[in-house]
Structures are given as structure tokens and as C-alpha cells.
Amino acid sequence: MGLEDRRQTERFPTRDVVRIIIGGVEAEAAMRNLSTAGCMVECSDIEVSVGQICELQLHPGFPASGRVAWQLGEALGISFHQPVPKGIVSGYALDDWHLRRA
């Protein structure tokens, strides 16, 4: 079964920087895609292990908690504990990237 087969929700490409906390360490991460169920981020400032609990600040006042589902170099797959509202996901989707600062 490939990665695409395991995804249950559509992921949308993004290019935002978010705050992430893993193992008590906080850093900035480049979010590359987002869905209601998870995301992929790139971060060189934190050492991680698959299964670690993490938190991302996606929206002011909306932290999304989850766990590291996979790790490949600086890329991390995050599986959220609770679904992220579709309105927050669509706010990050690149189809409106020109409306936000680069």
C-alpha cells in the first residue's frame, strides 16, 4: 500500500511558516501541505522520532496537536489527533496564495 492509498483526506499545497513544538522544543517549520487530518512540514531545527507528540500553531488561538507519522530528512509527516476545520485548511491552500504575503 503506497502513501497515496493511506491518505483519507485531500491535502492542499501550502507555503506558510508555522510554529511547531516537539519534545518541548519550539521552532519555525515550512508547511508544505495541509489537510483536515495532517500535514507535511520541513524543519531543520528540531530532532524528532516517529511517534513523538507535537503541536502546530495553525491559526491564532488554534493549536493543532498530533504525532509525527513519518520523517525523511528535514521533512515530517504530522497526523493530527483531531480534524482541523476545513475553513482553516482552505485559508492555507495555495489557490489564494497571491492574496497573502509571500
Image (tube, rainbow, N blue to C red):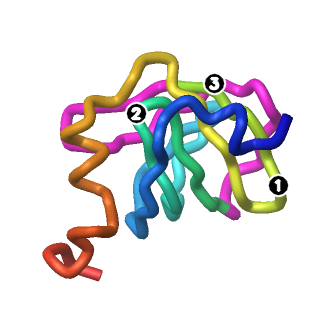
Pick the front one: 70 or 60: 70
- The image position of residue 96, as x and y in percent, is 21, 69
Element at label 3: strand
Amino acid type at image mark 2: Thr
Element at label 1: strand
Q: Name the N-terminal-most of marks 3 and 1.
A: 3
Quadrant of the rendering where the C terminus is positioned: bottom left
**Which residue is drawn at the image coordinates 79% and 47% (left, top)?**
71
Q: Quadrant of residue 75?
A: bottom right
Tell me the crowding category of disc 3: few under 14, some 14 to 19, or many 20 or more residues within 10 angstroms, Cα based: many
Q: Nearer the viewer, mark 3 or mark 1?
A: 1
Indicate whether residue 54 is drawn in magenta. yes
**Which residue is drawn at the image coordinates 47% and 43% (left, top)?**
10
Q: Nearer the viewer, mark 3 or mark 2?
A: 2
Magenta range is 44-65
Toward the left, the furthest residue is: 99
Residue under label 1, please give it: 72
Direction from residue 66 to residue 71 in the image, left or right: right
The numbered disc on residue 36 is 2
Q: Is residue 17 above or below residue 18?
A: below
Q: CA distance from mark 2 to mark 1?
A: 22 Å
The numbered disc on residue 53 is 3
